[in-house]
């Protein structure tokens, strides 16, 4: 397994750099294999979503589509894949940011009854409660 840094994932999804994007595509689409997949950590996923939102201006459906695309790539192993999927659905439904939804999903994974927050917006996600 080969770990993938955020910048490789972003270059693959954004296809915005004439040098780095083709290299990321070559790696992910041609060099990675089921027996030697690429690993995307939960930190790299959160960073990727942040970059796509803040730097590239993706919102809601667009961000959810990019994350869903990653979930569908057979040669990628995403850490906490079910929680990434749950966070993607929350984003698609307009319930909050990917990072917030991921925090709630990861808490639920380890059987937290809920996650407390001061953030008024995040409270739309079922896993959150006010402090």
Image (cartoon, helix red, strand yellow):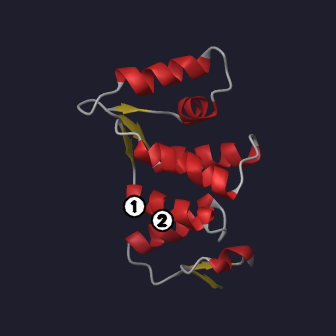
Q: Mark 1: which secondary structure?
A: helix
Q: Residues within 10 Å of mark 2 (few under 14, many from 20)?
A: some
> Can residue 128 be seen here?
yes
Give the residue displayed 56% in from the left and 81% down from the top.
Answer: 126
Q: Nearer the viewer, residue 43 or 30?
A: 30
Mark 2–mark 1 CB contact (< 8 Å): yes
Give the residue displayed 74% in from the left and 78% down from the top.
Answer: 120
The answer to which quarter of the image holds residue 20 is top right
Give the residue displayed 51% in from the left and 24% down from the top.
Answer: 24
Where's the N terminus, which quadrant? top left
> In the image, which disc is placed on residue 86?
2
Residue on which disc 1 sits: 82
Q: Position of residue 104 (x, y in %)?
A: 53, 71
Q: Nearer the viewer, residue 45 or 22?
A: 22
Q: Residues within 10 Å of mark 1 (few under 14, many from 20)?
A: some
Where's the C terminus, which quadrant? bottom right
Is residue 91 depicted above or below 112 in this figure? above
Q: Position of residue 28 (x, y in %)?
A: 43, 27
Q: Nearer the viewer, residue 70 or 100?
A: 70
Q: Mark 2: which secondary structure?
A: helix
């Amino acid at each position: 397994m080969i770990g993938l840094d955020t910048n490789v994932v972003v270059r693959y999804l954004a296809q915005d750099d004439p040098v780095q994007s083709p290299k990321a595509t070559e790696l992910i689409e041609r060099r990675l294999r089921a027996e030697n997949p690429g690993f995307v950590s939960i930190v790299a996923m959160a960073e990727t979503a942040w970059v796509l939102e803040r730097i590239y201006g993706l919102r809601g459906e667009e961000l959810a589509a990019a994350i869903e695309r990653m979930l569908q790539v057979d040669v990628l192993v995403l850490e906490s894949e079910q929680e990434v999927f749950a966070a993607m659905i929350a984003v698609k439904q307009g319930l909050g940011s990917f990072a917030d939804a991921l925090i709630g999903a990861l808490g639920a994974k380890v059987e937290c009854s809920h996650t407390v927050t001061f953030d008024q917006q995040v409270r739309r996600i079922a896993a959150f409660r006010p402090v």
